Image: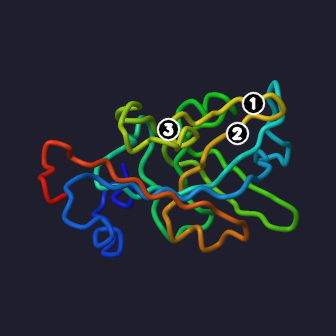
Amino acid sequence: VAAWRSGPSTAATAASAGAVEGADARIVVTDSYDALRADGAPFSGDTALTFRLGALETDRPLLRGVDGTSPRPGTTPVEASLHVDAARTIGVGVGDPVRLERGAASIDLVIVEIVEPVDASDPLWFGSTLVRDGVVPGRQFTEIGPVLVPPAALARVDRGAAHRWRRAVAVDALGESD
């Protein structure tokens, strides 16, 4: 799994966490996109599909690669990872191109890695069901993704995004002053 997903926290994140021991996860997920196959046809399913793009940085591995290699930053098309259940749902694998579109904005991707959670019960997943599960079915549409890219690739995106920061505190390391 890529170094950008298992590297150390940023100085700002570490400073905001103080001296309390634990692990951090920073998760960024964009607003929704439509997605197209290489032939220009939209992906389809039992309900409408909506895709999200995202980036994940953690102190400990939350995802492991089951096929392919980790995305490299700075590539064109953008190299990306996709959750194993999302890949199965839309029928893509390593080497497949995906174009995400919304209005005039688009981003071309190539799936280079299929991933799965190391531990789906890890507390760092709290509130991040889509990232943990890869597919979230709904009545009117099913969310797919996020298609995970190196964080710098999000600068190419002309969409809104939500940022979440989680810290799983090492409870056994807490003292009275914490």
Q: Mark 2 or 1 closer to N-term?
A: 1
- Name which of mark 2 and mark 3 comes first in the sequence: 3
Residue 138 disc label: 1
Q: CA distance from mark 2 to mark 1?
A: 8 Å
Name the element at disc 2.
strand
Q: Residue at x 57, y 48 (%)?
A: 111
**From the viewer's perspective, is residue 43 above or below residue 156?**
above
Q: Amino acid at mark 1?
A: Gly
Q: What residue is disc 2 on? A: 143
In this rendering, would 92 be left or right of 32? Answer: left
Residue 49 is drawn in which quadrant?
Answer: top right
- The residue that label 3 is drawn on is 132
Point 54% across, 33% down: residue:
133
Point out the residue furthest to the front here. Answer: 176
- Res 120 quadrant in image: top left
Q: Which comes before the other along the chain, label 3 or label 1? A: 3
Q: Residue at x 72, y 66 (%)?
A: 159
In the image, 164 versus 40, the foreground residue is: 164
Report x, y in % for residue 85. 57, 30
Q: Is 124 on the left-hand or right-hand side of 130?
A: left
Q: Is residue 165 above or below residue 16?
A: above
Under circle 3, the secondary element is: helix
Q: Is residue 35 left or right of residue 22?
A: right
